[in-house]
Image (cartoon, rainbow, N blue to C red):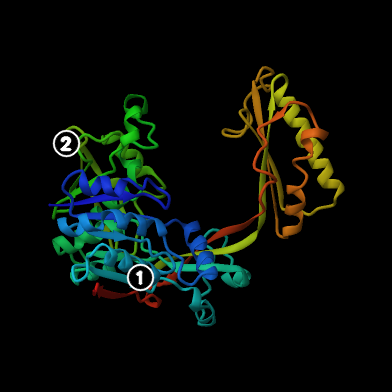
Amino acid sequence: MIRIASGQGFWGDLLSAPGDQVRGGPIDYLMLDYLAEVTMSIMQKQRARDPAQGYARDFVQVLSDILPDCVSRGIRIIANAGGVNPRGCCEAVLQVARAAGLAGRLRVGTIIGDDLFGRLDALLAAGHELRNLDTGEPLASIRDRVLSANAYIGARPIVDALAHAADVVITGRSTDTALTYAPMIHAFGWSAGDYDRLAAGVVAGHINECGAQASGGNSLVGWREFGDTLSRVGFPIIEASADGSFVVTKHPGTGGRVDRGVVSEQILYELGDPRQYITPDVVADFATIQLDDAGPDRVRVSGVRGGPPTGQLKVSISYAAGYKAVGTLVYVWPDAVEKAMLADRILRERLDRMRLSFDAVRTELVGWNATHGQLAGPPRADAPEIELRIAVRAQAKGPVEAFTRELAPLILTGPPGVTGFAGGRPRTQEIVAFWPALIDRREIEPHLVVEVLDA
């Protein structure tokens, strides 16, 4: 049996969680998931400004805290913190390790090859259209606006790194699930055709990938009963067995909860066709999952079935899609809704007179219609306050910047009772859009570099 602990569920998660996992009880592996589709484009923009950047800097901060403990306890770390610059991330980790006096005691494996940004023109010329999975459009239609392009790679490169005794494994756009099931393949010697066990590993990875969401965070199930304990929430740990079954748990004495309800919620998270959970290594059938309570904060998962992988890999592409700005004003009682609606009409009429071209102008009245759409019946006349939130989007920057200058004047030239305006004008932001595509897996050749920290 091996224990694979989740330490981060996204870039920006609790920085204390990895240390709590390392020091809170026995674990063998610590996985840290930092990447989402939009994260890659953010990192690409960072690298464009500074070639040394483009990775999750939080990861380096985390390692400065936990790396000595991990080395002394034999805990191996796997993270997709490399983003669009795994080599830069590796160099930063080596600096932290050297400062911690770990020379000669640490091996860092870096996996590269998922980044297709520099290969796009060659791939298009070779006939790979990279059509948008949602619209069918070829990538050529937006080629000049592409910011990043990364193929989702699977567990095999991570397994290779572990086989080469890497203590820290850094990847770019690995699938989130692979960070958990790669150690299972390594420890138990599963073959590429052992589809049921690989599928079980994928389920384990899916449960682990969002951090405390599998141990009570963001949970609808019983949150009133354990919600007060979330200030010290324990992140999930997978106790995996060679037959593919595993137990989801957390360190004793930590907050949150692990039960069938909470784990079921996480299994359903971001799930499409439950029988077709596609990864680079296996297609898992989530409809075969069996969940059983195995004691306090322990859920056993078994019965997972899987099938062969497809001949393609998913590619996550981001591209520039114009500009946006969002501004808010708060209107107070009495007649808060009516005031906010009048302010919205006034602002829109002023923008119309300026003959500005917007792709969209959207208004929400937070406290009345922003979360679930417009409520049934007329707005409450006695609403104590309403936040007017208005957003614009345009291909050109000029109209958006003009909008940012029109919101504040409403304070003195619109309805009465404005409060909550602070921080200056709304900020114009670039819009980064997501372009999902597929590519022949034979075009992707990830490879591994393992370095031993010298003095």
Percent from the top left, x then y, of residue 262?
A: 31, 36
Q: Is residue 181 visible?
A: yes
Query: Relative to 45, is 125 above or below?
Result: below
Label 1 CA crowd tier, 10 Å (few <14, some 14–19, many 20+): some
Q: At 57% from the left edge and 60% from the top edge, which residue is drawn? A: 135
Percent from the top left, x then y, of residue 295?
A: 16, 33
Query: Which amino acid type is shown beneath numbered disc 2?
Result: Ala
Location of residue 247 (image quadrant) = top left
Q: Nearer the viewer, residue 139 or 344?
A: 344
Q: Is residue 198 visible?
A: no
Q: At 12% from the left edge and 52% from the top edge, which residue is drawn? A: 1
Percent from the top left, x then y, of residue 69?
A: 20, 54
Q: Which residue is mark 2?
A: 294
Q: At 55% from the left edge and 68% from the top edge, which residue is drawn? A: 49
Q: Nearer the viewer, residue 95 or 265?
A: 95
Q: Which residue is mark 1?
A: 91
